[in-house]
Image: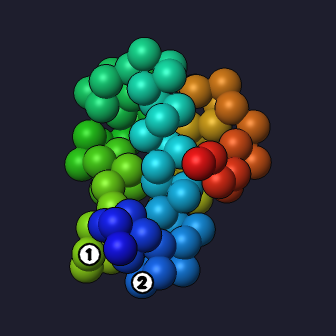
Amino acid sequence: MAQTSKLKHKFGGIEVIVKENIRAARIEANLDMNEASRALGFSRKILEDNEAIRNYGCHVKLNLLAAMAELYDKPIEYFFAENE
């Protein structure tokens, strides 16, 4: 089983999908983590935590997700769509 598949199973899947889409949207917006964190008004560490898929935990700050949807010009639904 691939690492992402293992983590989807461990965390129920939706958290992993959202985190993958958060990262994809930032990259598509041509922003690095430092640029995005400054524009969002959150620390780089918080942004990294919301993009990273780690074995010990998987959480997403909803207020940050809403701000990212606006900055990255994506509907909120984009972050919940499974793109395989």
Q: Give coordinates of residue 35: x percent, y percent.
A: 33, 22
For the point 35% across and 74% down, which residue is it?
1
For the point 39% across and 54% down, which residue is it?
50
Residue with the most extreme front position: 1
Asked where in the image residue 17 lies, by quadrant, the reply is bottom right
Q: Are marks 1 and 2 in contact (CB under 8 Å)?
A: yes
Q: Which residue is mark 2?
A: 10
Taking depth in this image into account, of 33 and 21 the one nearest to the observer is: 21
Q: Give coordinates of residue 48: x percent, y percent.
A: 29, 48
Q: Give coordinates of residue 77: x percent, y percent.
A: 75, 48
Q: Give coordinates of residue 75: x percent, y percent.
A: 75, 37
Q: Amino acid at mark 2?
A: Lys
Secondary element under disc 2, as helix, strand or loop, is: helix
Taking depth in this image into account, of 12 and 74 the one nearest to the observer is: 12
Q: Is residue 47 visible?
A: yes
For the point 59% across and 68% down, which residue is it?
14
Q: Is residue 7 left or right of residue 75?
A: left
